[in-house]
Amino acid sequence: MFESKNQILGILGIILGIIVISFPVFSELAGSILAGLGLIFLGIWLMALSFDNWGYNNLGSLAALVISLVCILLGIGFIGNIILFEMLLDGAFYLVGILLIFSGIFQLINPGDTFDKIVGLIGVVTGVLYLFMAYIAFDPEFMALVLGLWLLVAGFMQFLSSNERHKKDNIPGV
């Protein structure tokens, strides 16, 4: 059904992006759930990428795996825990921004094609935007939109990358 792992990763990114974008923020509980789910989805994405890149860059993959586990554990801790969320509210969104930057850097330094580098660059830019918006105007709904859009773009780029690689494999002499 799927021609490569990149199509599966692309679809995973698109689905996670849609989930993050469509999650409404109505209260502090919803904010803690939103931050927790955002971190969990980012952790899932990083974990999938770390396994995908394992044979190319084991050290980078291991670092991405560790960061993905930290994301998932922090995300689980934030879900429904209003007291923890209030204590770490600002820090949570700074953390997501920093983790987005690291995930983009990992994508940039791992061997790959132009699509992989574009996804990495978008991750770094999104992380910087996330940090900037957390500093200027904390708005959980906007933060979810930014994270969700990054996941959508990264998912589409992974999917397109898979299609380009498949075309190259089917063209004689390339």
Image (cartoon, rainbow, N blue to C red):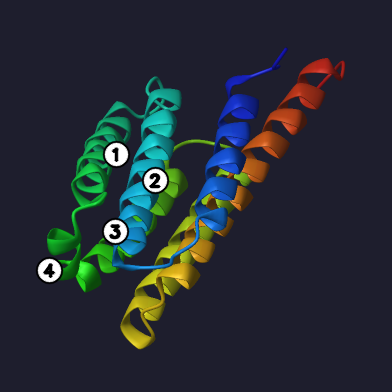
Q: SS of the residue at dot 4?
A: helix
Looking at the rendered image, the disc whose residue lies closer to the viewer, 1 or 3, is: 3
Tell whether label 2 touches label 3 (CB within 8 Å).
no
Looking at the rendered image, the disc whose residue lies closer to the viewer, 3 or 2, is: 3
Q: SS of the residue at dot 1?
A: helix
Looking at the rendered image, the disc whose residue lies closer to the viewer, 4 or 2, is: 4
Residue tagged 3: 32
Q: Residue 44 location, x and y as percent?
A: 39, 35
Residue tagged 1: 68
Q: Amino acid at mark 4?
A: Met
Gap between marks 4 and 1, in whole Å? 22 Å
Tell whether label 1 touches label 2 (CB within 8 Å).
yes
Please state if 95 lies on the left or on the right of 97 as rendered.
left
* Vertical arrangement, residue 169 with respect to residue 106, above or below: above
Q: SS of the residue at dot 2?
A: helix
Q: Which quadrant is the N terminus positioned in?
A: top right
Q: Residue 163 location, x and y as percent?
A: 76, 30
| The disc label shown at residue 42, or none | 2
Is 170 in front, or is 16? 16
Is 114 in front, or is 45? 45
Looking at the rendered image, the disc whose residue lies closer to the viewer, 4 or 1, is: 4
Task: Kindly give the residue lying farthest to the top in the view shown.
Answer: 1
Residue tagged 4: 87
Which is more N-terminal, label 1 or label 4? 1
* Residue at image location 69% in from the left, 29% down from the top: 162
* Vertical arrangement, residue 22 with respect to residue 77, above or below: below
Count of numbered labels shown in the rendering: 4
Gap between marks 2 and 1, in whole Å? 7 Å
Q: SS of the residue at dot 3?
A: helix
* Residue at image location 29% in from the left, 59% down from the top: 32
Which is more N-terminal, label 2 or label 3? 3
Q: Amino acid at mark 1?
A: Ser
